[in-house]
Structures are given as C-alpha cells and as structure tokens.
Image: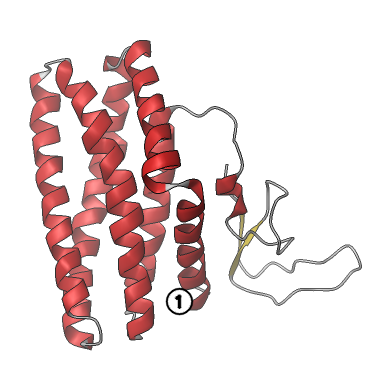
Amino acid sequence: IGPLWVKGGIPIESVEGETYEIRNRVTLCRCGKSKNKPFCDGSHYLVKENKLNPIDSLRIEHGHIKQMLQVLKKSVKIPEDQKMAITFLKEYADKLHHGKEEDFLFKEMSQNKLADEIKQIDILLEEHKVAREIIKNMSESVGIENEFKKYSDKYITLLDQHIDKENNSLFSNSRQTLSENQLGKLEVGFKEVEENKMGKEKIGELLKILKSLMNKYLN
C-alpha cells in the first residue's frame, strides 16, 4: 500500500550503479507502475490493491493529511504553493476523507446507539465544520503571509488532535462495535466515493500535490 519511504539521506543507486541525488527523504515505487522509477509518482493509487479493512484505509488517509500538516508547519509563503495546499485540504482531507467518515463511518457507528460513541462523533462533526471554516479563511488569505500562517497554524492545531482522537479512540472502538455487515457497507461506500464521487485519477493527482510540496519543504 503506497510507496516505500526512505529517510536519512541514504544513497539510492540505479541498476547501472548511478547514484541519484541524495535527499533527506524519498519515496520509492512499490507497485511497479511509476513512470519515474525507482521513485513513486502516485500511480499506486490507480492500481487495484489487496483488500484493505475500511478503517485501515482511513488511517492511511490520516497519514497523508499529517504529512500535509508537516508541510504547513514549514511556513508556506509562495502563493501558488499555498493554493496547492488548500486544494489538497479541500479535496483530499475534507471531500474524500471527511466525506467517508460523515456519510458512512459515523452513520454506521451511530446506529449502534452507544452513548459514548455518539458523543464523540458529535464532537468530531463539529471539528469538521470548524476545519472547513479555517480552510475558507486560508483561501481568503492566500498571498498575505502573516494571515495565511495564522490560519494554517489553527488548522494544524485542530487537525493534529482531531486525527489523534480518531486513531487512538474512535477507530479502535469501531473494530469492536461494528459488525462484519457494517464493515462491508463501509467498504462499498468508500469504494463509491473513491471511484465515482472523486475518481481514482483525481485522488492520484492530489497525492502528487502532496509529494511535490513534501519534496520542496521537507527535504
């Protein structure tokens, strides 16, 4: 699932013995479909992968969103880069990821009528609303350095703790409370979002945006 991450300035050599440019971190192709081998170009998202538990797929998306938060922590000042980051947050973090949670995961978990879970879901839904408002503020402050940083910092603070709550509590609980039938519904629903509402190609493009910004700001 996804690329192989190599960190720490480790030299990468081609089969001919040529050493590629040494970077602090690189992503290597693991699916065999990259057009930029040995490096990943996001093509893995267009490849049918082994069946994955739907909750695990949400965790993987969290990982991608966390990577964008790391980019934002580096004070993105170039307006074009700010716009690219906003596109990723709007389309990947919100439309794709939060859409899956709101339309499928939260609804299935709420049907089990467990008071603690319903309370937690209500809090998470409110945080989704706040996140959308912050993204709107970020969009309106593109090119205004201090303003963009102020709102991106707010987004980072919100999403960091939001993701941790879901990973460490809600997702863990879901494994115990969701039935196989419910997990099956999530799988079907998530596939519908990925293939029809978003499209695999669009998701691949968003991950390329993430990779591009990571290479620029985190290497």
Image position of 191 with respect to 23: above or below = above
Is there any visible trace of residue 29 in the rendered image?
yes
Total marks in image: 1
- Residue 61 lies, in percent from the top left, at 40, 46
Type of colouring: secondary structure
Give me the residue at 16% from left, 17% from top: 111
Q: Residues within 10 Å of mark 1 (few under 14, many from 20)?
A: some
Kindly state the secondary structure of the residue where label 1 is placed: helix
User: In the figure, residue 137 lies in which quadrant?
Assistant: bottom left
Quarter of the image where the N terminus is located: top right
Q: Which residue is mark 1?
A: 217
Image position of 58 with respect to 28: above or below = above
Give me the residue at 36% from left, 43% from top: 197
User: In the figure, residue 69 lies in which quadrant?
Assistant: bottom left
Instruction: Name the kind of residue labelled 1 in the image.
Output: Tyr
| Residue at far front of view | 196
- Residue 143 lies, in percent from the top left, at 25, 87
Is there any visible trace of residue 74 in the rendered image?
no
- Residue 79 lies, in percent from the top left, at 32, 84
Give me the residue at 45% from left, 76% from top: 217
Left or right: 59, with 163 as reference point: right
Left or right: 59, with 3 as reference point: left
| Residue at far right of view | 16
Give me the residue at 28% from left, 59% from top: 90
User: In the figure, residue 53 lies in which quadrant?
Assistant: top left
- The residue nearer to you, when weighing 208 against 165, is 208
Left or right: 207, with 156 as reference point: right
